[in-house]
Amino acid sequence: MSHRPPSGLAAVSTALLAMSRHLEMRDVLKTIVASARELLDAEYAALGVPDDHGGFAQFVVDGVSDEQWKAIGPLPRQHGILAAMLHEAKPERLADVREDPRFEGWPAAHPDMSDFLGLPIRDGDEIIGALFLANKRCPKPQGGCGFTAEDEELLSILAQHAAIALTNARLYERSRELTIAEERSRLAHELHDAVSQKLFSLRLTAQAAAALVDRDPARAKGELQQVAALAAEAVDELRAAVVELRPAALDEDGLIATLRTQIQVLDRAHEARVTFESLGVRALPAAQEEALLRVSQEALHNALRHSGAAHVDVTLARSDAGTVLRITDDGRGFEPSATRRAGRHLGLVSMRDRASGVGGELTVESAPGKGTTIEMEVPGG
C-alpha cells in the first residue's frame, strides 16, 4: 500500500530540490529566500551574507518590490537583531520584533514588521549567513508569535541545506575564478606570441628598408609598404586581444548587451564585417550566459584570425528546445573530421566542454572553401 507524503514534507522536498539546482551565488541566495518564505507562509524573507567590515557582502530579500528596496537604501549593518543572528549564533523567535530591546529601528521606506523568526546558517563553526522571516500570514494567537516551534524546526532543516548550497556556490565561484585566471594567462601568452612575432617582422623589414633607401629606393618603398601592413596587423591583434582580456560585464549588462558591445568593437578592429542579432532571447542562468559568451569569443577568434572571412554573423535566438548561439563565417572553412589536431587548434574541444558543462550541445558545420557555422544550444530562454 502506497502512502502519499504529507504536504509539508512535499513542500520541504520541493524547496531542497530548488536549492540544489543552482551554483551561482546570487541564484542560490534568491532560491533559499523564496523557498523559506513560501515554505513558512511569511510575508517577508531575507538572507544576509556577512562581510569582514561589520556589514553584509550580500543581502537578498523576497516580498519587497524593487522600488521599495531602492527606497530603503544601502545594505544593512550588522546591528540589533541582525547582529544577534551572526554573533550570538542562536535562533530568534519574537512576537513583535519592534518591542525587543535590541531593536534599533529601520529606514522610513522599510515595510512594517512584527512577528519574526531568524536563525544563523552555519558551515561547521563558521557563520556564513543569517536567514530572517517576518509577518506570518496565518492568524496568530493573542499576544503570541505567528511563527511556531514547528516553523523554527522546519527553518532549521532548511538552513542546514542552505549551508550546503552556499558552500557549494562559494567553491564554484572560486573554481570559476581559477578558470578565468587560466583563461587570462592563455590570452596573455597568445598576445605575447602574436605581438612578438609582428614586432620582430616589423624590425627586420624596417632595417631592410633603411639599408635599401639609398641604393634601391623602389625596393625600399616596397619594404616600407610591408612595414605599414605589418603595423596594421599588429594593431588588429592588439585590439582583438584587449577585447578578450576585458572582463565581461555579464552581471551588470547581461549576455545580449555584452555580446553586442564586444562585436561592435571587433567590427571596428577588423576588416571583416562582424554583425550581431538577438531574436527573442530572455535572460538565462549566469553559468549559461558565461558559457555562451566564451564560446562566441572562441569562435569569433577563429573566424577573424584564421578563416580569412569577409563576413562573420552572430545570432542569438530562441529555439524549440531553448536558446541557440550561431556564429557563421564565409571563410576558407576546414574538414572537421580530418584531424584531431585541427580541432584542438581551433578550440573545438574547449567549446564542446563549455557547452556540455551547462547542459548544452555544440555542433560544427564546415568544409574547405564553404565557410564555417558553429552552433551552441542550451536549454531554457
Image (cartoon, helix red, strand yellow):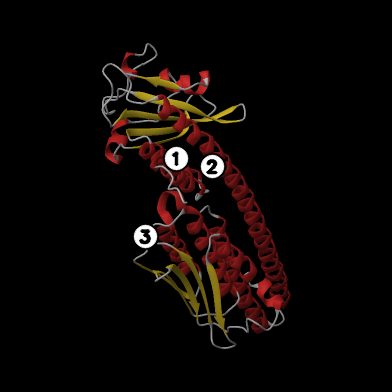
Instruction: Name the mark on residue 91.
Output: none
Please tell me which of labels 1 and 2 falls first in the chain: 1
Vertical side of 228 occupied by 15: above or below: above
Say which residue label 2 marks: 165
According to the picture, the residue beneath numbered tag 1 turns out to be 32
Describe the element under mark 2 as helix, strand or loop: helix
SS of the residue at dot 3? loop
- The residue depicted at 46 percent of the width and 68 percent of the height is 268
Which quadrant would residue 139 be assigned to in this image?
A: top left
Tell me the kind of residue under disc 3: Arg
Check whether the beta carbons of the residues at disc 1 and disc 2 lie within 8 A of each other: yes
In the figure, residue 261 lies in which quadrant?
bottom left
Q: Give the left or right position of residue 48, taking residue 295 as reference.
A: left
Q: Give me the residue at 36% from left, 13% from top.
A: 100
Instruction: Tell me which numbered mark, 2 or 3, is placed earlier along the sequence.
Output: 2
Image location (x, y in percent) of residue 286 = 47, 53
Q: Give above or below for 304 relative to 167.
A: below
Q: Amino acid at mark 1?
A: Ile
Seen as rendered, the residue at the extreme bottom is 369
Crowding near pointer 3: few (<14 within 10 Å), some, many (20+)? Answer: some
Q: Is residue 346 left or right of residue 99?
A: right
For disc 1, the neighbor class at 10 Å (few under 14, some 14 to 19, many from 20) is: many
Marked residue nearer the N-terminal end (3 or 1): 1
The CA span between labels 3 and 1 is 23 Å
| Residue of label 3 | 282
Give the residue at x 73% y 75%.
211
